Image: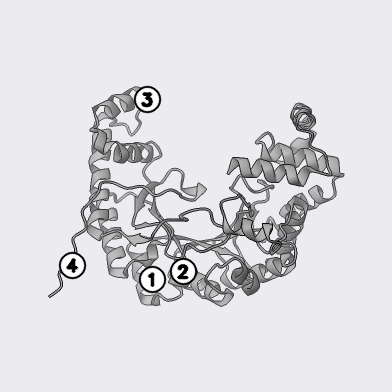
Amino acid sequence: MTRRKTIKYQGFEQGPIRPPSEASSLLIRLTRNCPWNRCAFCPVYKGTSFSVRPVEHIIKDIDKIKIQVDRIQTDSPNGIIDKEKASILWNQTDPEQQIEFHAALNWFANGMTSVFLQDANSLIMKPDHLIEILSHLRTLFPNIQRVTSYARSHTISRIKQADLNAIARSGLNRIHIGLESGSDEVLLLVKKGVDKQSHIKAGQKVKQARMELSEYIMPGLGGQSLSEKHALETADAINQINPDFIRFRSLAIPSTIPLKRMVDQGQFDPCFDAQIAQEIHLMISHFNNIQSVITSDHVLNLFEDVQGKLPDNQLRMLSIIENFLNLPPKEQMIFQVGRRLGIMQYLSQLEHEPLRNQVESICNQMNIRPDNVDASIQEIITRFI
């Protein structure tokens, strides 16, 4: 008889990423890395192998957080911890326990209401294992309001609806899915490993399970040649899903991703800001009969204020993009550079003279002009990434 190999517990773990909306969440690592890991646009997890952590290891991580939270609460009976008390507790913490202490402290300081399950595809776990983890988490921390995870459409589309419903009842109440595009041609080009119909099926199953659903869209992913198809097919997929949230993540092409080689070999022509703005405008204008909330909560997005609820704020969001597209080239340049450097957040800040002067001074120093701004923006984004 073959004995099952025992995997030694290596201590509390934290994965490398989380959504911006989970900044105040406790991060609990269920899986390591990504089971697909072939997307041409993704810089994360490359050169790593995927694994599912043993349930008993995850339970130990949760127990460790409980121990640290209890320590913090003992010194903070009013639910607030100041820097001095935090520093004292940190100095009293065993070095081998400092990772879980830091995670618990951040969570405690943010109210301990949300948890994010890492890494890229927690729902690849066996449903009964995931339910066991969720039940333990909810038992130890009954005041949690939201538990969230990334998941792949390819995985969810293959989970039985009854199992997905049971997972939702056990406490997983929000799913983030990287839809990226609704175009099969684009999805194949960037090696997403899923097709449009599977995206739609997965999204509808999540909604049927009564979990909140965030769908991520990547403007620019079709390049210049597939920009229109990318916009229209993505809007069509979203209309069939009706997710709770639509989150824009504009494409960036650092040197570390496979898509950069495609650019260098002439297989992909990137879109620049004005083209991406037109693409987003086309996409939003074709969102019909849905009640999703559009968010633009990432620094790579040109328009932070293109957000709001559909259909109520649809015209306002479209008007912001139209205002940008109707600007003279120099005005577009000032906003592009101001936004990418973190000096401006909103298009309306072009009217703020001190900010304008600051950006124009930088443009002069860096020799950025309307005719070379796109190349300059790409360089700025690459440095940032």
Q: Secondary structure at mark 4?
A: loop
Front residue of 75/95: it is 95
Residue 220 appears in the picture as rendered: no
Q: Is residue 20 left or right of residue 182?
A: left
Q: Secondary structure at mark 1?
A: helix
Q: Amino acid at mark 3?
A: Lys
Of pointers 1 and 2, the one earlier in the residue sequence: 1
Q: Where is residue 172 drawn, in percent x and y?
A: 38, 60
Q: CA distance from mark 3 to mark 1?
A: 42 Å
The mark closer to the camera, 4 or 3, is 4
Q: Amino acid at mark 1?
A: Leu
Of pointers 3 and 1, the one earlier in the residue sequence: 3
Of pointers 4 and 2, the one earlier in the residue sequence: 4
**Label pair 1/2, CB-CB below 8 angstroms:** yes
Q: Amino acid at mark 4?
A: Arg
Q: Secondary structure at mark 3?
A: helix
